Image: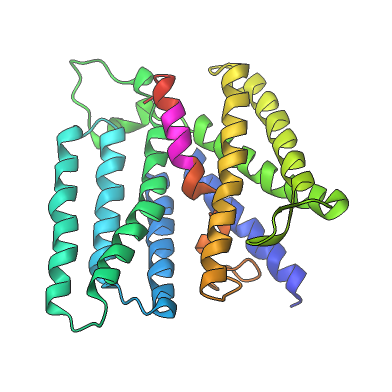
Amino acid sequence: MNNFTKRLITGIGFVAVLLSGIIFHPILFYIVFSTITILGLYEFYSLGNKMKVEPFIIPNLIVGLTIFTITFFNAAQIIDNHVFIIIVPLLVFLSVFELYRKTPYPILNIAYSIFGILLIVVPFSLFSYFIFNKNLALNDNVIVSIRGIYQNYDYKILLSFFLILWSNDTFAYIFGISFGKHRLFERISPKKSWEGFIGGLVMSIIMAIILSKYFSFYTLNFGILLAIVVSVFGTIGDLFESMFKRSINIKDSGTILPGHGGILDRFDGVFLSSPIVFFILYLFSWV
């Protein structure tokens, strides 16, 4: 099987799984995205040995899954905001674990562990607030149950997010290959160009305009703002991951997606854009 065929099959399967996790049901969303979160976190921690960092992987994965889970149920309005207090002792325990390990750089281990949570777990966890619209919530006198979470489930924002992100990535590559002459950030990513960035941004805005016609619950101005945020911070996230890989001298973050690299490679545009989109949604009273 040649590399193009491998990339094509992997890409189709990857998109199919992701869209299934977004569109069909919140429980399927939880399964797909919690799995992606844990795989991404494991991949990130596995790369630590290239920097003489040895994070305690299993406890970190448990913490990551716990944060994703409580965020999901909080967004679904099954549990209230007080549950987030559990994050404090969890992070403390990560530090305590290092007392019982004989590693040369325990403080670096702790810092790298917490950074992994912030970089990977938080952005994916915030997706839960994209899919649960508080304006569609159940009546106050109704007890919210797991069976009832579908009633305020709305996949359109998250689907828009990924369609815009994919439009940006695809057309930034096409415009960059076709017209790229001026380097965007040559020290970090020699192939990225301003022409590619502008092409990706323009096509992201066009995608947002199209989506705003079909998803009439949000305005054209909101769609354009969403496109600009996703395009700009998605590109910065891509550059950030390139900087990380360059610092440890690797081409791909992993091999879990044949022909496409690892989880970090496929979702680098998410890590910085997701928190900013969450902030925008908060301003628009979605969350």
**Which residue occupies the foreground of this view, 161 or 202?**
202
Q: Quadrant of residue 207?
A: top right
Does residue 141 appear in this view? yes
Q: In the picture provided, is 179 more to the left or to the right than 54? A: right
Is 77 placed above or below 241 here? above
Provide the residue span drawn in magenta. 274-280
Residue at 12% x, 74% y: name it: 99
Q: Quadrant of the N terminus?
A: bottom right
Task: Depth check: give the residue in front, 268 or 167.
Answer: 268
Residue 221, above or below 131: above
Q: Residue furthest front?
A: 187
Question: Which residue, as the protein is rendered here, is positioned at the far right?
Answer: 178
Depth check, front residue: 251 or 133? 251
Quadrant where the C terminus sits is: top left
Verify whether residue 252 appears in magenta: no
Could you tell me which residue is drawn at 32 percent across and 21 percent down? 137
Total marks in image? 0
> Residue 62, position in %: x, y?
25, 62
Give how far across and how far down residue 2 sits, in percent: 76, 76
Is 162 on the left-hand or right-hand side of 66?
right
* Figure quadrant of residue 101: bottom left
Image point (51%, 74%), residue name: 248
Percent of width and height locating residue 261: 59, 68
Could you tell me residue 92's position as x and y percent?
14, 58
Residue at 57% across, 48% down? 236
Image height of 14 relative to 236, above or below: below
State the scheme by which the image is colored: rainbow
| Helix, strand or loop for the magenta stretch, by majority | helix
Q: Is residue 26 visible in the rendered structure shown here?
A: no
| Residue 254 position (above or below residue 189) | below
